[in-house]
Amino acid sequence: MIQQPPSVTLAVRLMVGLVVLGAAVTVLTVVQRDELIEAWSVGHPADSSIQPPAFVPVAIVLYVVLAGLILVLIPFLRTAHNWARWSLVAMVLMVALSTLACLRTDPPVLFVVFSIASLPLDAAILYALLHRDTSAFLRDEVPVRA
């Protein structure tokens, strides 16, 4: 059996950290629903017929789907399925891009703090997933150790 390199172990741990951070942001969305609506309302006139979006259900569904996908793909990554790595890379890139897009909307301060904290985490995950040891492991080029 091929031993999992430290870069894969690191990627897995960091992705679990991303799932935990996502849970914190989801809880924050529930707790600070009014602040989010207020921040959204700044760019819209008070007499507008446009209703504020329902942030809470969207955040919960998005979290459940992304966390579920990450947690389902991790075992495939650990058993050397290269397609799982590329799926995780795509997901982390999507999370980073949407985080940057959210920062442009001037959310409440705690969301900015969590967003800024998540970007280095995303970069570290991508580094670990694209590391040469991870690539060698997924191509079955790692020497067998007993």
Image (spheres, helix red, strand yellow):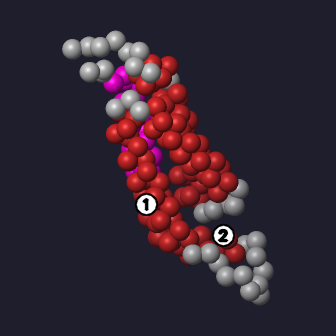
Residue at the spot 21% in from the left edge and 14% down from the top edge: 146
Residue plotted at (53% across, 52% down): 114
Q: Amino acid at mark 1?
A: Val
Residue indicated by mark 2: 39
* Disc 2 crowd, CA 10 A, few/some/many (<14, 14-19, 20+): some
Q: Quadrant of residue 143?
A: top left
Answer with left or right where residue 102 lies relative to residue 127. Answer: right
Vertical position of residue 30 compared to residue 146: above or below: below
Q: Residue at x 54, y 46 (%)?
A: 91
C-alpha gap between disc 1 and disc 2: 24 Å
Where residue 40 sits: x, y (%)? 67, 71
Magenta span of residues: 4-21
- In the image, what residue type sits under mark 2? Ala
What residue appears at the point 40 percent right and 19 percent down from the top-left corner?
Answer: 140
Q: Mark 1 = which residue?
A: 64
In reply to whether residue 139 is colored magenta, the answer given is: no
**Mark number, residue 94:** none
Q: Position of residue 108 (x, y in %)?
A: 60, 63
